[in-house]
Image (cartoon, helix red, strand yellow):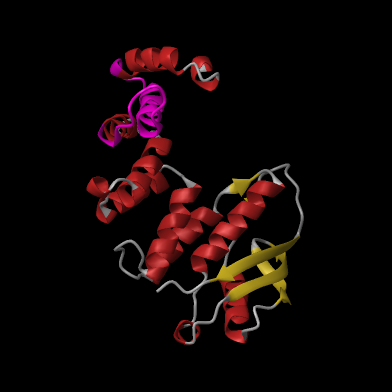
Amino acid sequence: MANYKAARFQTAFRQFSVLADAGDANAQLQLAYMYEFGQDVVPDARQAVYWFERSASQGNVMAELDLGYIYLNGPIGFRNSHEALSWYQAAAGHGSFDAQVFLANAYWHGYYDAPKDHEQADKFFAQAAAHAVGTQDEMGNAMRSIVDARKDVPPEAIKANMQGKVTATFDCIDQKAQNIHVTVSSGYPLLDQALVTAIQESVFPAWAPGAEGLTHYSISEVFTIVK
């Protein structure tokens, strides 16, 4: 791993290859990255997927996440939304916050060929909220991810091509938002209210034991219409 971090990719590739062939899940993950990004090897999505799958078969959550991403956004020949959802489900089951929020977003809106199912989405939102965070950055990132996943653009706003940025502040008490105020309006009350509603309906992670952070937060969301 030291050779990889020092960008001595030739040596790292040889070492990872030996360890990966012997069944080391982390070496399989690192070898997959090298094939994915072409680090001292010709980029090869097929080899990357092979080693990600070898690593994921041992429960490596990072490999599961990467497989979900590749099947969703990778080369055309690999794109398969059902396969992507399956790997995100596996990562969520192994406790990945990112996978849980991804699936909540998918089921809340019916994205990525997932059925629109708010009950299923709420299950994944609850799993994400069950995480404990230890730093202010982690809390801020978690809040933004959850609110962005739950945010709905009103059909009337889409029809009228309303777009803009909204900023709202709020207090977070017992994982729920209180005293929500729009401080920067998009110029469209429908969009402003959409952000307020998303914040109101969200449940945020708790602080880890012994960790302390702010109770007053600000979230900005940009509403764009993609046609």
Q: Residue furthest left?
A: 77
Image location of residue 209, percent across then percent down: 69, 43
Image location of residue 31, percent across then percent down: 37, 25
Q: Nearer the viewer, residue 224 or 111?
A: 224
Task: Look at the picture and state if 21 lies above or below 171.
Answer: above
Q: Nearer the viewer, residue 133 or 15?
A: 15
Using residue 57 as the reference point, say whether residue 198 is left or right of it.
right
The quadrant of the picture occupied by the C terminus is bottom left
Secondary structure, magenta segment, majority class: helix
Residue at x-position 47% and y-position 74%: 225
Residue 152 in view (yes/no)? yes
The image quarter in which residue 58 lies: top left
Part of the protein shown in magenta: 21-46
Image location of residue 79, percent across then percent down: 27, 50
Task: Look at the picture and state if 17 lies above or below 38.
Answer: above
Image location of residue 85, percent across then percent down: 32, 53
